[in-house]
Amino acid sequence: MALQPAPPEISLHATGSVARRQAMSRGSRYGLLGATLVGVFVLLFLAIDVTRLGSSRLNMDFFTSYPSRRAVDAGLRSSILGSAWVMAMTVMLAIPLAIGTAVLLEEFAPKGRVTAIIRLNIANLAGVPSIIYGILGLTIFVRGLEIGGIQVIPKLGGSILTGSLTLALMILPMTVIASVEAIRQVPPSLRDGSLALGATRWQTVWYHVLPGAIPGIMTGTILAIARAAGETAALIMIGAFAFIAFDNRSVNDSFTTLPIQIYNWTTLPQEAFRKNAAAGIIVLMVGVIGMNLSAVLIRERFRRK
Amino acid sequence: MTEQTFPLHGSPEAEALTRRLQKSRWRHPFEVLIVWALWSCGIVSLLTTVLIVFTLFEETVNFFRTVPVTEFLFTTNWQPLFEPEQFGIWELVAGTMNVLFWSLLFALPLGLAAAVYLSEYAHPNVRRVLKPVLESLAGVPTVVYAFFALTFITEDFLRPLLGADRVPIFNAFSASLVMAVMILPTIASVSEDAMASVPRDLREAAYGLGSTRLEVAFKVVFPAALSGIIAAVLLAVARVIGETMIVAIAAGSTPNLTLLPLESVQTMTGYMLQVGLGDVARGTIQYTSLFAVATALFIFTFITNVAATIIVNRFREAYD
């Protein structure tokens, strides 16, 4: 059979059902992109809405005034100070614990049942709701822990120390998981080289593993701190929902934080307090987004190396 | 081949050296100290779990000394703060399920679509920008979402749209909508990771057989990553169940056995915060009821998280 001559017009474009499938596939790109952008638009919308409502309250007095019954006189002084105290203490408590746990799991503990249990336990703790940590803080820190007549943990009341301990326990799992991941990224050859030159295991960890893991640990830690900075429910449970009209001077002081102040203003019926809440949100969001952004930047910067 | 022998092998000197090396850890007391310090760090997380379980259990037992277990589990009225006191958990569970249902209804399609887009469609540069932006939604403090739900979703959106008389100021729907936005990144990001780890061969084979991108995404990659996607959804479910501020501020404080969205409801977490805000005296029934509800919440989230962990681990083994 002789070869058929080519038809006069050859088209590379599909027809019929194939064309339909291809058109659907091309169209789906925009549909899916649209769905992806919904969240981004909500974030933008939120930012615009809050700025519109709250920007008029953002002046120096707002930052230097204590809370007040009158919306125009009320400010963030005590809540910003309280947040700063609690965050600083939380960081100091949680980070050594988290890095210590991660180093133990990755570098020192024998791979066995105990390590597996600690790992599983941390994974589960990461999913425990923050309000449960609040109840834990209320029971063992605010009221103190007594086992068999012995005061294991003293009564700390609704103090900055209680808040920090509670938040430190809350962010511990996240921070450990991030630190474990970061330590795993350090190439084994670095450890072998160090050990072969006669370094002890701790020297290897201190001089080679941890410096290599620092960017990853920092990224995870900053994200965890951002979460703690925005935490409200756990702190309300330990009794931080208080009217504070003085500057915090010690870890035994009662305190309030930025998110709690925002919550307080949100629940008040007068419209004027809504503006305060919106202005407080601007301050909180600038802080939290700043932290998130720096975490992403650190991650991107060190990933390319 | 000649067998290589070490001149010192078996000699007393070698034995002594071996013993010294074996004992060498004791020559570094600092090392031993460090290991002990690290173990005590590791113990803290175990202690946390033990203490959570212990404190919840202790007061829950006290609660059930006053309120029969059967009333808690098999009646539906939750009226703890005034006479006659009633403690049927189901109204609070219904509040949680209401918000869970409506938030998943929106977050599931949007989150999965975002995951498919980021994994199968987006240019790597677009993904590098879009994914962190989307993830930043998870970093927004929940009290901010709550403010947004109350002032914006309810007052500026739902009420003008559906009529102020039909939308109570505190309603489950506004909380559900912002909750959907809150869990979007969890669903999208974790599902995207699962889809990205589907082997390239599967996609190439499907393209080779003439599939379009849409078909590859939904008929090949999506099923292959299904267990990872289910785990992502379960993590999101656990976040919704445990979320407190959004529901406490926007959904109201009326225990209500309904799944209708435009109703004022109270969730388990909402009740816990309500008790936490008041100065409830230790030993009262309201105080112990806080722990009973907390135990229920803990069990719900624990089961969800364990299920997610099991599914993720099984999924990891699939392609190794």
Image (cartoon, rainbow, N blue to C red):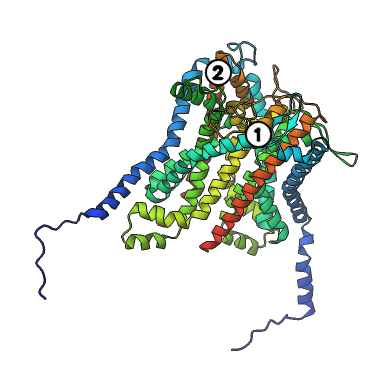
Residue A109, numbered circle: none
Res A109 seen here: yes
Question: Which three-letter amino acid code belongs to the residue tagged 2?
Answer: Arg
Q: What residue appears at the point 42 percent right and 47 percent down from the top-left corner? A: B118
Q: Is residue B4 above or below residue B146?
A: below
Check chain identity for marks 2 and 1: say if they share one.
no
Secondary element at tag 2: helix
* Residue ID for mark 1: B91
Q: Nearer the viewer, residue B147 or B93?
A: B93
Q: Mark 1 falls within which chain?
A: B
Residue A50 on image: x %, y %: 49, 23
- On screen, residue B83 versus residue B271, left or right, reads right
Residue A236 on image: x %, y %: 69, 28
The single residue placed furthest to the right in the displayed view is A149
Q: Quadrant of the N terminus of chain B?
A: bottom right
Res A294 seen here: no
* Residue ID for mark 2: A274
Q: What residue appears at the point 48 percent right and 38 percent down from the top-left corner? A: B106
State which quadrant residue B282 falls in.
top right
The single residue placed furthest to the bottom in the displayed view is B1
- On screen, residue A112 versus residue B29, left or right, reads left
Residue A115 on image: x %, y %: 70, 57
The single residue placed furthest to the front in the displayed view is B75
Question: Which three-letter amino acid code belongs to the residue tagged 1?
Answer: Glu
Q: Mark 2 falls within which chain?
A: A
Query: Marks 2 and 1, how far apart in space?
Result: 31 Å
- On screen, residue A46 versus residue B121, left or right, reads right
Residue A97 on image: x %, y %: 70, 45
Front of the two marks 2 and 1: 1
Secondary element at tag 1: helix
Q: Is residue B270 above or below residue A278?
A: below
